[in-house]
Amino acid sequence: MDVPVPPAPSRSFSAHSQSFRHAPISRHAWPVVTLAALALAVVSALTGCGPSAPGPGGMGQMPAPQVGVVTVKPVGVTLSTELPGRLEAVRTAQVRARVTGVVVKRLFTEGSLVKQGQSLFEIDAAPYRAALDSAQASQAKAEAGLAQAQATLERNRPLAEARAISQQEWVATQSAQKQAAADLASAKAAVTQARLNVDYAAVRAPISGRIGRALVTEGALVSQGEATLLATIQQVDTLYVNITQPAADALRLKRAVQDGRLQAPASTQAHLVLDDGTDYAQPAKLLFSDLTVDATTGQVTLRAEVPNSRGDLLPGLYVKVRIDQARSEGAILLPQQAVTRGAGGDTVLVVGADKQVGPRTVQLGGARGNEWVVLGGLKAGDQVVVDGFQKIRPQSPVNPVPWSPLGPASGAASAPAPALAASR
């Protein structure tokens, strides 16, 4: 099969060419010609040799891709950190049985506020009242015995002085009087104990606060030997917040303050962040830091006090606590999407003087909102890439444009920094 070849641009043709041009072309040859032309066009497009390829003079060269950057500017920043914490009642009292008996009545409403000394449970006190009556009778008997011994002593005193009675009888009279006095003291103690048992049968609130659910019902047998727990009272108008922080972080901040790289915070306040991400209205006050480090977790405990006048917070609730731990006058704020965090350290991409992008290691001092606080690794005037990571190519220049949180200046969706950091 003869395949036609396009004529050369020259105006003179040989006789062979003329005959070849006017040779008949089979209808089956056109698909081959079309496929060959299509393949040539595709190769030209891939290799950049088509009409859009740059000419010898560099005309038509592709422009450098735009990336959104922020220009580093040191500012004064308060270094805050969010730590986990757990709420705890300021005072907690366990209401327990102090005598053995059957619960006759519950005298409070579960979940209500009770006052110190208020009756909560009533235990059957009949046996203890009977014991009190018996003790009081024994006391009366002891009082009578003491009166008789005292009268005998007074009667024998002048006889002993006149030596009308023997010395042995006088000593026995004195001993009888002292024994009668001791019997009376013992009887009085028994009366006091019996009266206490009667009082303990009426279980009272040891502190003021909010009482929980009753752990026993009427008819239950409680015992002082087992110290049966009846209910729990907690004071929740003010709560403690027990906060845990890695000891290494606390030591690092302390050394930075001592070295002068950071300043101590102006206040000792902390702010609670609830589960829904909202801040609790009233600030907490830091009280102290524990003196020891937990050997199992390597963490140190801090305690704060937070008002709870409306009862919005409950003991045992886990919260996040935002604490101002130091202040830096030369810190740098960067959007979090500009920082790549990894096991080898934290890095950012910086546009150099040659418009090429390179990684740089930075030291973070915590987060503030959706920004990282950078304490080291950057200097004023550095241009840090925030947007357009997917456009960056190795050893290729870029066109940095200012980035805005309302919308990337480069006009492209942001790509995560780790994808580029992993390629270096």
Image (cartoon, grey):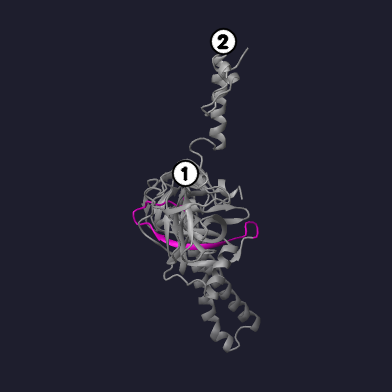
Residue 251 to residue 161: above or below: above
Q: Is residue 208 left or right of residue 222?
A: left
Q: In the image shown, does 40 or 15 lie closer to the viewer?
A: 15
Please say whether residue 297 is one of the residues in the magenta stretch: yes
Which amino acid type is marked by label 2? Ser
Residues under labels 1 and 2: Cα distance?
41 Å
Q: Is residue 360 left or right of residue 235?
A: right
At label 2, counting other C-alpha atoms closer than 10 Å, the crowd grade (few under 14, some 14-19, many 20 or more) is few
Which numbered disc covers residue 26? 2
The range drawn in magenta is 295-319
Which amino acid type is marked by label 1? Gly
Relative image position of residue 362 (x, y in whole percent): 55, 60
Residue 191 to residue 53: above or below: below
Relative image position of residue 101 (x, y in whole percent): 51, 47
Of helix, strand and loop, which one carries label 2?
Answer: loop
Residue 204 to residue 43: above or below: below
Of callouts 1 and 2, the N-terminal one: 2
The answer to whether residue 332 shows anywhere in this view is yes
Q: Which residue is mark 1?
A: 60
Of helix, strand and loop, which one carries label 1?
Answer: loop
Image quarter where the N terminus lies is top right
Residue at left 54%, top 20%? 34
